[in-house]
Image (cartoon, rainbow, N blue to C red):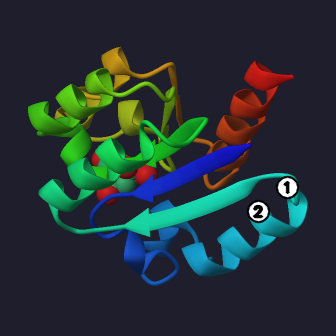
Amino acid sequence: MKIAIINGPNLNLLGKRETDIYGNMSFDQFLSQLKAKYPQVVFSYFQSNVEGELINEIQKTGYEYDGIVFNPAGYTHTSVAIGDAIAAIKAPVVEVHISNVHAREDFRKLSHVSGKSAGSIFGLGLKGYELAIEYLLSRTS
Ligand code: DQA
């Protein structure tokens, strides 16, 4: 089972960035925990602050991996091109947001990704990534 985790802009700052919203743990720390918890999964991890690089990674992993866990961060609310990339690929995508985007500013309620994804998880902190992995594992068992 191969799962790609893709994080969008500013998520390289997890653990330092608005910790009241996003928590104190860096994504590297969290990824080590995920790898230990799911030894049967081959993970790839990619983070970028650049829209086109995220699209390239979706296209690359979208035909090679069994599933993608994707937090598009701010591009969720603005990027038609990222939504199109998800619609173009074979792998199921689970959209994850650490914070509850529906309990924040109105502009965060629009997602160009939700309608193209297998499902979406928001507001459950980093646990959302784990739940997305559980879902992708359940699809193949
Ligand atoms: C986020 C929510 C987005 O609205 C925001 O722009 C982010 C992070 C989240 O994980 O809660 O950068 O995707």
Amino acid at circle 2: Leu
The residue lying toward the viewer, choosing from 66 and 104, is 66
Q: Where is the C terminus found, in terms of image quarters?
A: top right
Q: Position of residue 110 (x, y in %)?
A: 22, 26
Residue 34, disc: 2
Residue at image location 38% in from the left, 30% down from the top: 102
Answer with left or right where residue 104 lies relative to residue 129. Answer: left
Q: Position of residue 116 (x, y in %)?
A: 34, 19
- Gap between marks 1 and 2, in whole Å? 6 Å
Amino acid at circle 1: Tyr
Q: In the rendered image, which residue does mark 1 sit on? A: 38
Q: Position of residue 93 (x, y in %)?
A: 48, 31
The residue lying toward the viewer, choosing from 7 and 125, is 7
Q: Are marks 1 and 2 in contact (CB under 8 Å)?
A: yes
The residue lying toward the viewer, choosing from 17 and 20, is 17
Residue 12, disc: none
* Above or below, 21 relative to 78: below
* Above or below, 95 relative to 17: above
> Please, what secondary structure does the residue beneath circle 1 have?
loop
Residue at image location 78% in from the left, 66% down from the top: 35
Q: Position of residue 140 (x, y in %)?
A: 78, 24
